[in-house]
Amino acid sequence: MMPKVYIETTVISYLTAWPSRDLVRAAHRQLTREWWESRRAGFESYVSQIVLREVGAGDPEAAAQRLHILRDIPVLRVTDEVAGFAEELIKRVPFPPKAAADAVHVAIAVLHGMDYLLTWNCAHIANAALRSRIDAVCREGGYEPLVICTPEELLEE
């Protein structure tokens, strides 16, 4: 059985991003493309309704390209249980109010039994300072914590 990975919006954004002179952005773009082309096939990939809404925003041509890339990836639902767990994360981690959608991404991935949450959002999701609190809220809620990481961290087998 292949491991399951929830692909958060920032990964799709970097996958389809225009080339950049910013070295960090260029590196994230390249690493994302490497993961997508060489490693994604080793995972069961999933997104959510939230990801589709976020990648569908902005420039219509770019949004269409992002949505096209996700056309064959299963979509996880935001249930009442997901919403309740996201609220618990917002209160207890705590996620700032502006990062409520980030808490929903974590809740979706946890409640749908993902092994990994793949993201470039290192401010509120792949943040080492928040990780132990996220794990504690998961365990106290009776859920298994998942691995939150960047595409770079999943390049190696």
Image (cartoon, rainbow, N blue to C red):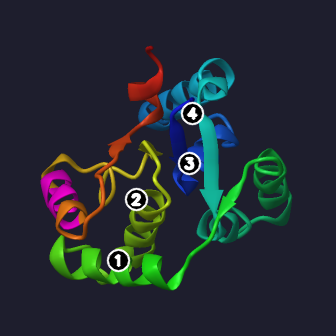
| Residue type, numbered disc 2 | Val
- 146 relative to 69 in the view: left or right: left
* Residue for point 19% across, 74% down: 94
Segment colored magenta: 130-137
In the rendered image, which residue does mark 4 sit on?
29
Residue drawn at the location 49% of the way across and 38% of the way down: 25
The disc, 3 or 2, on the residue closer to the chain's N-terminal end is 3
Residue 12 placement (x, y as % from top left): 63, 47
Q: Which residue is mark 1?
A: 85
Which is nearer the eye, 67 or 45?
45
Between disc 3 and disc 2, the foreground one is 2
Distance, label 4 to label 3, CA atoms, is 15 Å
Residue 139 spot, x, y in % from top left: 20, 60
Query: Of callouts 3 and 1, which one flags the residue occurring earlier in the amino acid sequence?
Result: 3
Residue 7 shows which numbered tag? 3
Residues at circles 1 and 2 in contact by the CB criterion of under 8 Å: yes
- Residue depicted at 48% across the width and 27% down the height: 27
Marked residue nearer the N-terminal end (1 or 2) = 1
* Circle 4 or circle 3, nearest the eye: 3
**Residues at marks 3 and 2 touching, judged by CB atoms closer than 8 Å:** no
Give the amino acid type for the residue marked by disc 4 in the picture.
Answer: Arg
Name the residue at 74% across, 66% down.
56
Label 4 – label 1 distance at C-alpha: 31 Å
Q: What element does badge 3 sit on?
A: strand
Q: CA distance from mark 3 to mark 2?
A: 13 Å
In the displayed structure image, the side of residue 62 where residue 133 appears, left or right: left
- What is the quadrant of residue 90 in the picture? bottom left
* Dot 2 or dot 4, earlier in sequence: 4
* Image quadrant in which the C terminus is located: top left
The answer to which of 83 and 127 lies nearer the viewer is 83
Q: Distance from label 2 to label 4 (Cα)?
A: 26 Å
